[in-house]
Image (cartoon, rainbow, N blue to C red):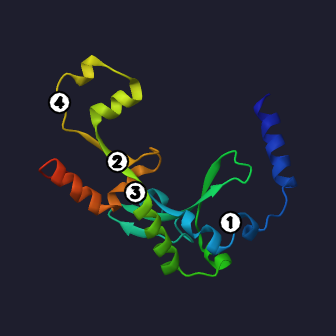
Amino acid sequence: RDMETVVDRVLKLLDERLDINLKNIIGAWDEVKTNIGVRLINYEWNKEKLQGIPHKKLLDLAIVPFLNVEFESGEGSGTALVNEQFLKNWGIDESTLWKAAGEWLEKEEFEYKGIMELLTDAIGECDELLGEKCKLYFYGNQSRAYGAVAILRTDILEEFAEKIDGSFY
């Protein structure tokens, strides 16, 4: 279809959308609190977006909470950035939100791998890559999605420094 037809259809769908009760989508706090996680985003690039979003600044980044949503049909999942309206609907304050996010972070599984092992996982055996021992490492979550939050787990970073018998940056 041509672009004009597609745009017209999207605009029509937007006009027809139903009013949605946010409480029905996000659930009650007791039902969702174990699904609250965090992501790291660039603070400067997202300054406007961060208005109305609970966040904590870390260096040039912002730590933001999200809600992991599993679809009832079992056909996938998604995430929603938690905003102040979520807190009102849940009847909680920011400290309660951050406590739940911290508990999620403690349970999230992270890993570190040599960069060559990671590349081999991604592209298969490649003799040219594996020739010389490389001192580059990957550190992130096992799903390889939004794994930058791994840097918040300083306990794992310290354990890794001991394992390689040195420090890193």
Image x and y of residue 159, in percent: 22, 56
Disc nearer the start of the sequence (4/3): 4
To which residue does mark 4 refer?
133
Q: Mark 4 and mark 3: span between their CA atoms? A: 27 Å
Q: Is label 2 or label 3 in front?
A: 2
Judging from the image, what secondary structure is the residue with disc 4 in? loop
Label of residue 149 in the image: 3
Q: Is residue 54 left or right of residue 16?
A: left
User: Few, some or many C-alpha atoms within 10 Å of disc 3 (few <14, some 14-19, many ≥20)?
Assistant: many
To which residue does mark 2 refer?
111
Judging from the image, what secondary structure is the residue with disc 2 in? strand
Q: Mark 1 and mark 4: span between their CA atoms? A: 48 Å
In the rendered structure, which amino acid carries the disc numbered 4?
Lys
User: Few, some or many C-alpha atoms within 10 Å of disc 4 (few <14, some 14-19, many ≥20)?
Assistant: few
In the rendered structure, which amino acid carries the disc numbered 3?
Val
Residue at image coords 42%, 56%:
42
In the rendered structure, which amino acid carries the disc numbered 1?
Ile
Image x and y of residue 134, in percent: 19, 33
Q: Mark 1 and mark 2: span between their CA atoms? A: 30 Å
Q: Mark 4 and mark 2: span between their CA atoms? A: 19 Å
Disc nearer the start of the sequence (1/4): 1
Judging from the image, what secondary structure is the residue with disc 3 in? helix
Disc nearer the start of the sequence (1/3): 1
Contact between labelled residues 3 and 4, with CB atoms less than 8 Å apart: no
Label of residue 26 in the image: 1
